[in-house]
Amino acid sequence: MKLRDNYQEAVKIFQPKPSYFLNAVKAFFVGGLICGIGQALQNFYIKFFTLDVSVAQHMVLGTFILLATLLTGMGVYDKIGQFAGAGSMIPITGFANSLASAALEHRSEGAVLGIASNMFKVAGAVIVYGVVIAYILGVIHYLFWNIF
Amino acid sequence: MKLVGKQTWIFENQVYLQAAATAVGPMETEGPLGEQFDVTYPDLYCGEGTWELAERRLMKDAVQACLTKARLEINDIDFFLAGDLLNQNVTANYIARDLPVPFLCMFGACSTSMETLAVAAALVDGGFARRVLTAASSHNATAERQFRYPTEFGGQKPKSATFTVTGAGAALVSRENSMFRITAATIGKVVDFGMHNPLDMGSAMAPAAASTIQQHFQDLNTSPEDYDLIVTGDLSGVGSPILKELLWEEGYDITDKHNDCGLLIYRPDQEVFAGGSGCACSAVVTYGHLLKEMEKGNLRKIFVVATGALLSPTMMRQNQSIPAIAHGVVLEVVKGER
């Protein structure tokens, strides 16, 4: 059988396979490193600024958002993302990157129609489905704990 | 009859590629062909405020350098044919706004370079114009924004993705003697083998390239041996072996003759995934590098097949497959006529 007779299947031998294992290992270590730094920062904030755990956690998130946005603007975060994949996409740094990169991308179209209306272009889906899933889980949680 | 076979034009009157020029961005300048381009820029903005303006600057520079090489003024040009990748072909249209020349805007995605060259040669051969200027451009950041994600977005791209070339190429077609004669062109059909992955355009475009090349051989009754080089536009590392396999199955072995502009323009260590792509890829490699190789005598007859993936992000999100097209132009060195 010729390649063209069964193209969509047969062509797969020519397409490079993603290195799932290596990608998973890289994502695991980079993601783990980011979380480790987060924990260290949290301990640092609690110890040196004598903050509550919940306040310190918000400080950590703020710090990460600031760092990720700076790294995005400096043109570094996309390189980290290419290396680490999900490892740098899943933590809040990935969310900050998606906002900052879209804002940067569209700043040539102005502050309102450019930056403001495009900023959530990538992250919007995360917010929408984050809210939807949280709602569904909230309902399930309520049903299980209060009714059954 | 100038139409031979089903899809191939033969240019019986002497039609020449009188002059050609290129302008490129930083990655292309650092690449292996960097010294062969006429205008080079060390950063993606090319001295402009936005990337869209940067792309326009590149096409403007290529057009200007081409006219300078041909020792002509813009008023000597009868028609301007150009295209790019942006919505409404804004680069080409805005360049044409500044030129006092009748203009035909063309879109063939990354096949635009050879589409404009083929039509220019037909206009000149048919006596509809004396001198036709063609141009094609692409810019990495404008293409990323339009077709993919924001440039600084930290998503991971697969190895099959290509890297849009930042640059522009311009060529002047006329009947005035030059070293490069345009002898034939094969206009491609839109081919769709049902591929859906916009980050693997090599797989989607290889059947289109195979269709055009096979038709070219059949129309002209030639074979790969008749060419020194058969070069595709941007099939990259994924599409190139597929093209060879598709043609081999039809009885044409192009293994020793084939190369791909997307593989020539960057070094493998430049982190460009499977290779270069974009309208500028075939334009700057052909007009910058391959013509110089022909000048040096390393190549005598080449068949440039620019490949285009005719997709849009909307069609991709609506789960449509990727149609592709390829247009080929034969360039030959003429000896002793200069």
Image: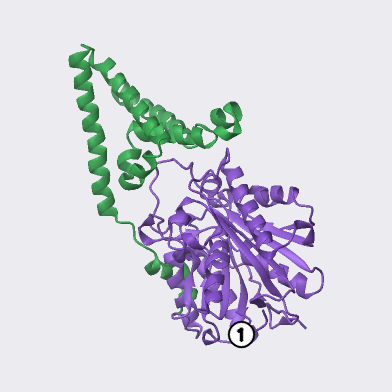
Q: Can residue B193 be seen? A: no
Q: Quadrant of the N terminus of chain B?
A: bottom right
Mark 1 sits on what residue? B218
- Residue most extreme to the right: B128
Q: How is the image coloured?
A: by chain
Q: Residue A69: name its quadrant.
A: top left
Q: Is residue B240 above or below residue B144?
A: below
Q: Is residue B148 above or below residue B241?
A: above
Q: Quadrant of the C terminus of chain B?
A: bottom right
Kind of residue at disc 1: Gln
Return the chain for callout 1: B
Name the side, left or right, on which A39 lies relative to B335: left
Residue A81 screen position, x and y as percent: 35, 43
Residue A74 screen position, x and y as percent: 40, 36
Q: Colour of chain B?
A: purple
For mark 1, give the secondary structure: helix
Residue drawn 49% across and 45% down?
B43
Q: In terms of depth relative to the viewer, which is nearer, A38 or B76?
A: B76
* Badge 1: residue crowd in 10 Å (few <14, some 14–19, many ≥20): some
